[in-house]
Amino acid sequence: MGRIITFAQQKGGSGKTTMAAHLAVALRRQGASVALLDVDPQGSLGEWFERREAWAGERGPDLSFRTASGWGARREARGLARDHDLVVVDTPPKSDSESRPAVEAADLVCVPVQPTPVDLWATRPTLEMVLKQGVRSLIIVNRAVGRAALTGEMLEAIRELGHPAAGVVIGSRVGFAASMGHGLTVMETAPGGKAALEIAALAEEVMKQATT
C-alpha cells in the first residue's frame, strides 16, 4: 500500500491547493508514482490538472487524478494507494464533514498556515480534528514574506499549537500562482529558482514524515 498525504486547512486562503499540486509534482520527480485526489467541490485542482494534461500532450500526464466527495474520499484514497506510492489529497476549506474522511484515511496530514496570529488561531479547529482522528500532522508555514515574517513571537505561537512543524518555510512568491494558471509548477517554470528549491526540500521532508 502507498502512503496517503492529505492537505487540510479549514481557513481559506492558505495556499492549500497550490501546495498540494506542487508537492505532488516534486514527489513524482523524486521517483515516486503519485496520484492526486480532489475532494474540494470548487474543483481548482481538477482545473489545474486539465491544463497539465494539455501541456503534456501526447506523452501524457505524469500524475494520476481522481475526484471524490464526502465519505467516498476515504474509499477512493485507499483505492489509489493500492496502485501508487503516494496519494496527495486536497480537501475543501470551511468544511469539517467533507474533510474528515480524507483525514481519517491519511498517513500524514499537512496543514499549511500563513505566519500571522489570525491564521494561527484559525488553524486550531483543523488541528483538533486531526488529533481526534489520531493521525500524524505536519504544519507547513506558507507564504512567508522572507525570514523576517518568522519572528520569535510567531515561532512561539506555532510551537504552542502542539503539532510538529516543517523545517522548510515556503516563501510568498508570485511564481507559484503564475505557474498554476498554466497547469505547471515552479519546477517547470523556474527550475533553478528559490521557490523550486523550497518545494523540493519540502517534498523530501514530507516523504520522510509520511513513510517513517
Image: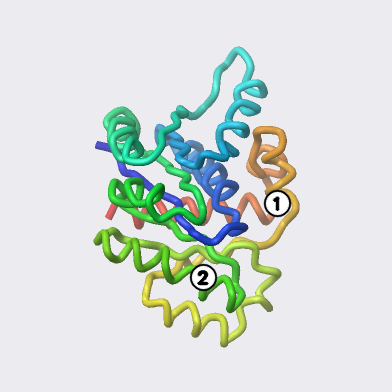
Res 130 → quadrant: bottom left
Q: Is residue 210 left or right of residue 188?
A: left
Q: Is residue 52 left or right of residue 135?
A: right
Residue at mark 2 to residue at mark 1: CA–CA distance: 31 Å
Q: Are marks 2 and 1 in contact (CB under 8 Å)?
A: no
Residue drawn 57% across and 40% down? Answer: 42
Residue drawn 47% across and 45% down? Answer: 90
In this view, the mark in front (2 or 1): 2
Q: Is residue 91 left or right of residue 13?
A: left
Q: Position of residue 15 (x, y in %)?
A: 60, 54
Q: Report the front residue among 96 and 204.
A: 96
Q: Position of residue 138 (x, y in %)?
A: 41, 63
Residue drawn 60% across and 39% down? Answer: 44
Q: Which residue is mark 2?
A: 122
Q: Position of residue 176 (x, y in %)?
A: 68, 49
First in sequence, mark 2 or 1: give its number.
2
Query: How would you rate the neighbour count of disc 1 (Cα within 10 Å): few for under 14, some for 14-19, many for 20 or more?
Result: few
Q: Amino acid at mark 1?
A: Gly
Q: Is residue 141 left or right of residue 176?
A: left
Task: State whether residue 131 is above or below residue 96.
Answer: below
Q: Report the front residue among 115 and 150.
A: 115
Q: Amino acid at mark 2?
A: Ala
Residue drawn 58% across and 57% down? Answer: 12
Q: Which residue is mark 1?
A: 193
Quarter occupied by the N terminus: top left
